[in-house]
Image (spheres, rainbow, N blue to C red):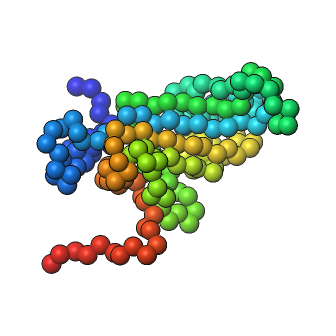
């Protein structure tokens, strides 16, 4: 029997059936699911090769697979940027690697942020979620002694949800700690 990630078990056993009931889907293929997770970080245009290698190593240890370096398409003199210069690092996760990363993000990394009050509940209008992390050292894979410069991280969670409400409900059932909206009434429990 093959290995099934913890969060994928939660999705198949609980979230899937809960979405079928709450949304009233007639077909199991209508239930939204997560397609992929993209991680992206920018690299300073004046960074040396050692710094680029360190960032690539750190993003690789966070993601669990080797990231791809992104290069500039054209030269922009105001930003001291030349053509084909390394400007970023990205990785796309699918399958078990995606579920493992999401589990570490939700269960370990986000709760370690100081004064954490939840993530913004705003989606992109098509059911996908974008999250910016200002310091990548919240992930346990990163040893702070080896970090010379802090780096931010953009996380994009792509779903098959057609609306923001579907995507938000999917992520909330998976354990995404959304921030409460100001002025929203608290949920009442029926007796």
Task: Give percent across and percent down for residue 78.
Answer: 85, 37
Residue beneath the point at 63% across and 38% down: 41
x then y, percent, for residue 50: 76, 29
Most extreme residue toward the top is: 84
Q: Is residue 95 found left or right of 149 in the rendered image?
A: left
Q: Quadrant of residue 103?
A: top left
The image shows a total of numbered marks equal to: 0
Relative image position of residue 141 (x, y in whole percent):
55, 41
Placement of the N terminus among the 4 image quadrants: top left
Would residue 83 be found to the left or right of residue 158 on screen?
right
Residue closest to the eye, 43 or 107: 43
Viewport quadrant of the C terminus: bottom left
In-front residue for pair 109/176: 176
Quarter occupied by residue 75: top right
Position of 110 relative to 30 (above/below):
below
Q: Which x, y percent locates residue 176? A: 40, 54
User: Residue drawn 45% across and 51% down?
Assistant: 123
The answer to whether residue 171 is seen in the rendering is no
Q: Nearer the viewer, residue 28 or 143?
A: 28
Residue at position x 71%, y 36% in the image: 43
Instruction: Check the image and report above or below for 191 versus 157.
Output: below
Is residue 159 visible to us here?
Answer: yes
**Residue 22 sits above or below residue 41 on the image:** below
């Amino acid at each position: 029997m093959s290995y099934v990630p913890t969060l994928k078990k939660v999705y198949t056993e609980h979230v899937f059936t809960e979405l079928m009931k709450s949304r009233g889907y007639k077909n199991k293929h209508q239930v939204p699911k997560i397609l992929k997770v993209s991680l992206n970080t920018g690299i300073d245009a004046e960074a040396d090769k050692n710094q680029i290698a360190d960032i690539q190593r750190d993003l690789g240890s966070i993601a669990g697979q080797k990231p791809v370096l992104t290069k500039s398409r054209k030269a922009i003199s105001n930003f001291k940027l030349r053509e084909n210069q390394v400007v970023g690092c990205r990785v796309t996760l699918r399958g078990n690697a995606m579920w493992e990363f999401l589990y570490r993000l939700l269960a370990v990394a986000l709760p370690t942020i100081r004064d954490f009050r939840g993530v913004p509940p705003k989606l992109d209008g098509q059911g996908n979620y974008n999250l910016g992390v200002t310091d990548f050292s919240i992930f346990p894979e990163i040893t702070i002694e080896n970090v010379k410069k802090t780096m931010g991280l953009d996380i994009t969670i792509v779903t098959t949800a057609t609306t923001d409400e579907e995507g938000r409900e999917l992520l909330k059932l998976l354990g995404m700690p959304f921030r409460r909206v100001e002025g929203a009434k608290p949920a009442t429990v029926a007796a």
